[in-house]
Amino acid sequence: MTQPYPPCEFSSSLMRFLSGKICCSLAYCFLIGTSKLEAARTELSVGPLSGADDAEVEVPLSLQNADGVVGLQLDFEPVAGRFEPTSFVAGEGAQGLQVRSAVMTNGHFRVVLFSASNRRVKDGVVLKVRGIRRSQEKPMESGLSLRAVTIADERALLREFAFAPYVSLSPRTNEALPGQSIVFDGLIFPSDQSVDGFEVRVNGRLVSQPMVNQQGRFSLTWTPLEAGTAFVSAVGRNGMGGAVSLSIPVAGEQIDSYEKWRAFHFPSDPSNNQGAGNPLEDADRDSVLNLWEYISGSGPHDSGEGPADVEHITHRIGADTFVGLRVSMRGTANDFKVVGEASSSLTFDPAGLTPAVVVSREPAGDYVIITMRDTVPVRAGTQRFLRARVRPVVE
């Protein structure tokens, strides 16, 4: 593939940004706070009992981080005088699984979700408990009290799990166009779990930290920048609780090359290598070059967005600790890619560079969240640095 642009990854202005923001030593990461990259525990959440008196309602139960889960057994009792269960239905996250239920001698209910073919459960609502709501005291209240939970994977091994607040997020409209705002409504239950707040990300990029009111509700407005599929998620800032992620189609031609991106964002300068749309220019003077704005999906005309989000992490393997990064990049790009480079010095001397290892690639709409780590562990008295770079794809 012939590249119309120079093979330089970044100009000196972006290198200064990389040195101060993306490249990081272990000591620097610990100073600003870092997360350990560990296997996420499955989270189980129970939704609220809401609706009119003497009406049929549903109480949803959802799972997050359900990777590998193929079966659940739930023992619970309904809140006396508030909820009378009548039936149990597999939710969207447990499509294809069978549901069996029984009333125990102590009056508790036991519900089992299983698959004869080890069909995996997906993140989201896995069970809907239908029944009659009685004598409501609040608009939203607890209808179920879980007594025992068993979660199994395809090897019939029990999975660790944690209880988490129930979170929902929904757009007021399913139609989206570039430049037109969309309002989302959110809910967290119980409402007293909302003190830590939430982060809402689109395609892996932080777009809002909405305030949650005393009723556990929040809302936010997001404006799509480009056409494509937007992947919207809401997670607790304390790492607990998350809404089922949404895929929002934004009408228009998908952008999969820098040429298309430049024509869309710089229609008056579609090809001039010295113009504002040049990949090594910084049109909005936010210290992020156009090339990185293209890769990360940020706005080249909005300096208020600031530098691209890069999460500094540490990755543990046995007794060793490795410096790592999580970077969101345009997964549809066919002309550039993101790679990681590690060094023992911030000068990143080419003679001492080592390539980073890609740990995972998580799809996020038209984007992908890449987790990478150094190959050399951090030892006492030493420092390691890691940076992300954009390189052209040559075929």
Image (tube, rainbow, N blue to C red):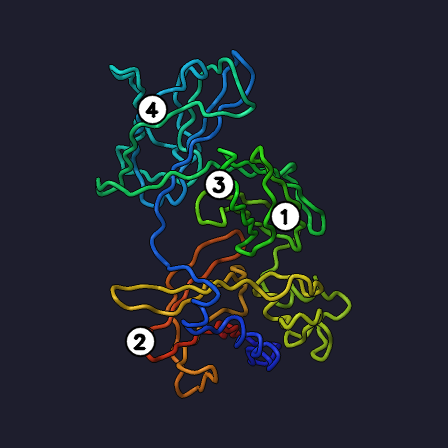
Q: CA distance from mark 3 to mark 2?
A: 40 Å
Query: Which of pointers 1 and 2 lies earlier in the amino acid sequence?
Result: 1
- At label 4, which amino acid type do we have? Phe
Give the labeled residue for mark 2.
379
Q: Nearer the viewer, residue 166 or 351?
A: 166
To which quarter of the image does residue 89 belong?
top left
- Residue 6: image quadrant is bottom right
Q: Residue at x 62, y 77 (%)?
A: 4
Confirm or deny contact between disc 3 and disc 2 (CB under 8 A).
Answer: no
For marks 4 and 1, the one nearer the N-term is 4
Indicate which label's residue lies in the foreground, 1 or 3.
Answer: 3
In the image, farthest residue toward the left: 156
- Residue sitting nearer the eye, 28 or 128: 28
Residue, disc 1: 250
**Which residue type does callout 3 highlight?**
Val
Q: CA distance from mark 4 to mark 1?
A: 41 Å
**Residue mark closest to the camera, 3 vs 4:** 4
308 lies above or below 113:
below
> Residue 395: in sight, yes or no?
no
- Circle 4 — which element? strand
Q: How many marks overall?
A: 4
Question: Which structural element holds mark 3?
Answer: loop
Q: Amino acid at mark 1?
A: Val
Which residue is labeled 3 in the image?
244
Q: Percent x, y for residue 147? A: 31, 27
Q: Residues within 10 Å of mark 4 (few under 14, many from 20)?
A: some
Pointer 4: what residue? 76
User: What is the x, y in percent for residue 309?
Assistant: 55, 62
Residue 81, percent from left and from top: 44, 13
In this rendering, position of residue 240 left or right of residue 255: left
Could you tell me how far apart the alpha carbons at marks 3 and 4 are, in whole angstroms? Answer: 23 Å
